[in-house]
Image (spheres, rainbow, N blue to C red):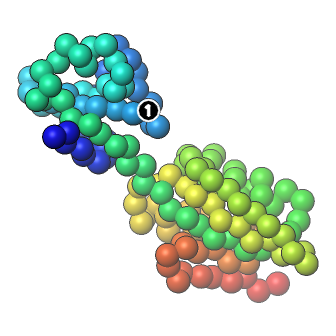
């Protein structure tokens, strides 16, 4: 039986031999000397030399939040929102879907984010972008509107 664990990046170290990246199929080896889990690509030759009973299959756990943004469709507004997410908050955008109709845009942005505090800071920064009418977590009812 193969044991499988969600990989949450808590006590880990990436193997120098294969340098795994998020999205790669990975396994972990419990290094008792370092008290860490050493992460290898599943097809790494080094894994074949490790005791099989200390190797576990891992899955990447990339925390993400879906943010819904609505606003007045204007030149550069998406660039301003992306700037807040990527440059000001230093977050990765996982997916982006924006539509416009009658001068109003609505979009869903998937963001790799770790906690509710950072999410709330992000929401407050995005609502501060001129032209954004509302922003909220898809699973939440947090909304704020600007009056023009």
Q: Residue at x 80, y 61 (%)?
A: 77
Tell me if residue 5 comes above or below residue 54 in the rendering.
Answer: below
Specify whether residue 132 is in view: no
Of the pair 103 and 41, the residue shown nearer to us: 41
Left or right of residue 128, residue 31 in this image: left
Left or right of residue 139, residue 130 in this image: right
Specify whether residue 66 is in view: yes
Of the pair 73 and 18, the residue shown nearer to us: 18
Query: To which residue does mark 1 refer?
Result: 24
Instruction: Give residue 110's position: percent from left, percent from top.
Output: 58, 58
Q: Quadrant of residue 58?
A: top left
Q: Residue at x 42, y 54 (%)?
A: 63
Disc tally is 1
In the picture, which quadrant includes the C terminus?
A: bottom right
Instruction: Give residue 51's position: percent from left, percent from top.
Output: 12, 21
Left or right of residue 20, residue 38 in this image: left
């Amino acid at each position: 039986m193969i044991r499988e664990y969600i990989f949450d990046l808590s006590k880990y170290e990436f193997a120098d031999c294969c340098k795994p990246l998020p999205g790669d199929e990975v396994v972990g080896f419990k290094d008792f000397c370092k008290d860490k889990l050493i992460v290898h690509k599943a097809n790494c030759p080094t894994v074949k030399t490790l005791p099989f009973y200390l190797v576990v299959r891992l899955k990447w756990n990339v925390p993400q939040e879906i943010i819904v943004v609505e606003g007045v469709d204007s030149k550069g507004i998406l660039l301003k929102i992306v700037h807040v997410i990527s440059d000001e908050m230093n977050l990765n955008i996982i997916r982006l879907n924006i539509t416009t109709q009658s001068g109003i845009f609505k979009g869903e942005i998937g963001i790799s984010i770790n906690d509710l505090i950072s999410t709330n800071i992000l929401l407050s920064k995005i609502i501060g972008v001129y032209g954004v009418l509302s922003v909220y977590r898809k699973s939440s009812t947090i909304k704020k509107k600007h009056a023009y």
